[in-house]
Image (cartoon, grey):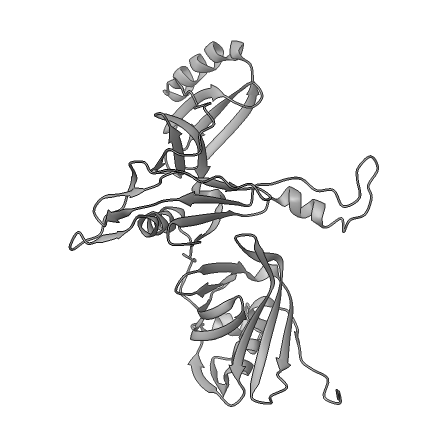
Amino acid sequence: MQSFGASQWSRAARGYEIRIIDRTTSHVIQLDGFEQADHDRLAKLFRNWYSTNLEMREHSLRGWNWGKTDFAKAELTFSVANRPSFEIPYTEISNTNLAGRNEVAIEFAPSDANAADKNLGGARMPGSKAGAGKDQLVEMRFYIPGTSTARKLANGNGKKDHDDDNENDSDDDEDAGQHVKDGDDDEMNAATVFYERLIEKANIGETAGDAIASFLEVLHLTPRSRFDIDMYESSFRLRGKTYDYKIQYSAIKKCMLLPKPDDVHVMLSLGLDPPLQQGQTRYPFVVMQFKKDEEVTIDLNLTDEQLQGKYQGKLDAHYERPMHEVVAHIFRGLTGKRITPPAKDFET
């Protein structure tokens, strides 16, 4: 018989729920819709079939927005008065950023249900409002003041929910998840320690396999900064000093290569859906700028079999051309999207 890592019984928004933590994958399975009378029967079932006790888990109902975070194996737990207020499974976190000196923003990937509603294009369906979609929490912010040593636990003091325009500040609290760093015990910003620990636990920025190609310090006009570009098999990553983005190729809807009027620079514009989101700012386009005469030499981290098989000759093993042409050509091969250039006979 399969045995679970843990099984928990708690009150939910409607009725009661069971949370099952898988011992091997650490994934959390939530089942709700139970009634209080089902507890004894389910507890007996878990004990006899899975050798697991169904534990009682009481959540905090105080409604406070300050408390203590704990980096568990499968999820981030926010507790108030030693009771869990809410849990965030690491698998639901799509990205995290330092939104300020003492703020850490956590972004959630939009659900497939919302994507399906979005594809309606605002058409009026029977019995529904035009363009109506489901509400969804897309970002949460933690306010974490003070400093912490690298060997101390990462402070997670308070939270701020961003659902539409709602913001709630929070106060200081004690240590939460563990963050260990070899060497001395230099003090660090507590928000930075929390941010680095969350990246580690949620595997943000980690991509299966090595990068196919990398470009350093590429100037971006939107969002405005210099990012290192790492291109992988199914996604690419923008690594900056403050922000870090991981974008799936499936989110790229259009690519345009546009010369600037100064006849010195060329811009590569990528249209995204869903757009990048940083706080309450959305970026439907990522715009990169290159010097027209800047050349680059690069060898792709791909075998001849991969080039001829999976990519069907759309990529070259070796490039020695202007940088904007190389980046555009690699994006074209990896995304399968056509790069739209300006018309040759177009005049303003």
Query: Can residue 337 be seen at all in this image of the molecule?
Result: yes
Q: Classify residue 137 as left or right of residue 190.
A: right
Does 58 appear above or below 288? above
Measuring 57% from the left and 77% from the top, which residue is drawn there? Answer: 328
Q: Classify residue 272 as left or right of residue 223.
A: right
Q: 239 or 1: nearer the eye?
A: 239
Q: How many marks?
A: 0
Q: In the rendering, at what x and y percent does residue 334 appear?
A: 55, 68
Q: In the rendering, at what x and y percent does residue 333 appear?
A: 57, 72
Does 184 appear above or below 318? above
Measuring 29% from the left and 36% from the top, which residue is drawn there? Answer: 174
Q: 27 or 188: nearer the eye?
A: 188
Quarter of the image for residue 80 reads top left
Query: Can residue 315 be seen at all in this image of the molecule?
Result: no
Q: 182 or 168: nearer the eye?
A: 168
Measuring 25% from the left and 47% from the top, which residue is drawn there? Answer: 148
Measuring 47% from the left and 15% from the top, which residue is drawn there? Answer: 42
Q: Quadrant of the C terminus?
A: bottom right
Does 110 appear above or below 220? above
